[in-house]
Amino acid sequence: MRRLFPVTDQTPARSQDGADREWSLDELADAYAYPALEADGHWLRANMVSTLDGAAQHEGRSQPISGETDMRIFGTLRALADVVVVGAETVRQEGYRPARAREAFAARREAAGQGPAPAIAVVTASMDLDFSLPLFTSPLAATLVVTGAAAPSDRVAEAKAAGAEVVVAGEGAAVDAARAVRELAARGLRRQLTEGGPRLLGQFVAADVLDELCLTISPTLTAGGAQRIAGGPSVTVPHRLAPACVLEEAGFLFTSYRRI
């Protein structure tokens, strides 16, 4: 792996024999570290992958356009977060499981005052979820279900019975994206990571609460009608971000853009 931006001499890209060198997990964690937060601050970053022609999925899943290093970064970003925020459709399509504790990040998480693994927060209006899945019944940190005040009461009761914490972040059935961020932060989950899907990311963009986008650009083409990384209605004025980091390996670009 090599760093394209910002250019530094702190992390050489190649080993002494000239071969591409795999970065350690510590190096990746340093590159993707959350910024220092104020006492009442929070930070929402998104992690998404896109093909060269703008597809965020292939046949409904992101895995076919991903790669080994992308998955290492995926795991690193999770290991740095207090909570992973994800839409219900993505939970169903990607077969989400609880985040696992990883020994490689144990000391870093302890020093940051974090538990052994991030919590998962599922955003859903309909509560159409299978609460018998391990994501709800056996996580290291209780899974949160973020929904509106008008969510079906029987499904709310079922979620709580399965061990999930229900977070109300909307007056009707729908979830208010900005309120969801605040409600999670109020529970001490201030380092936030969303993994989509596109509709949820679009809601965060529209609400102007996204602080950082970590976007992997996959050196692939798919054509077809796959979704972009963010969906939903467009914003009135495009949101401008500034590049924070660009890494490259095997044709993949691993980029990070932050709020200006």
Image (spheres, rainbow, N blue to C red):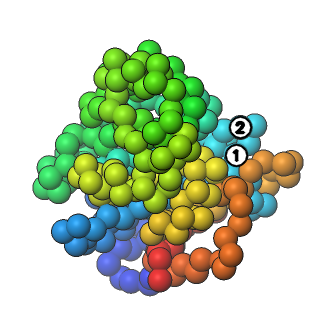
Q: Residue at x 35, y 73 (%)?
A: 11
> Is residue 195 visible in this depiction of the protein?
no
Q: Residue at x 22, y 40 (%)?
A: 116
Horizontal arrangement in the rendering, residue 99 relative to residue 234 (left or right): left
Amino acid carrying label 1: it is: Gln
Q: Are marks 2 and 1 in contact (CB under 8 Å)?
A: yes
- Residue 168's label in the rendered image is none
* Local secondary structure at mark 2: loop
Q: Quadrant of residue 38?
A: bottom left
Residue 189 vs residue 252, the one in the foreground:
189
Amino acid carrying label 2: it is: Gly
- The x and y percentages for residue 108 are 19, 54
Residue 59 vs residue 103, the one in the foreground:
59
Horizontal arrangement in the rendering, residue 40 relative to residue 84 (left or right): left
Q: Which residue is mark 1?
A: 57
- The x and y percentages for residue 54 are 74, 60
* Circle count: 2
| Mark 1 nearby-residue class (10 Å; few <14, some 14–19, many ≥20) | many
* Local secondary structure at mark 1: loop
Q: Quadrant of residue 236?
A: bottom right
| Mark 2 nearby-residue class (10 Å; few <14, some 14–19, many ≥20) | few
- The x and y percentages for residue 146 are 43, 40
> Is residue 242 visible in this depiction of the protein?
yes
Q: Residue at x 60, y 77 (%)?
A: 239
> In whole angstroms, how far apart are the C-alphas of marks 2 and 1?
6 Å
Q: Residue at x 54, y 64 (%)?
A: 207
- The x and y percentages for residue 163 are 31, 23
- Residue 60's label in the rendered image is 2
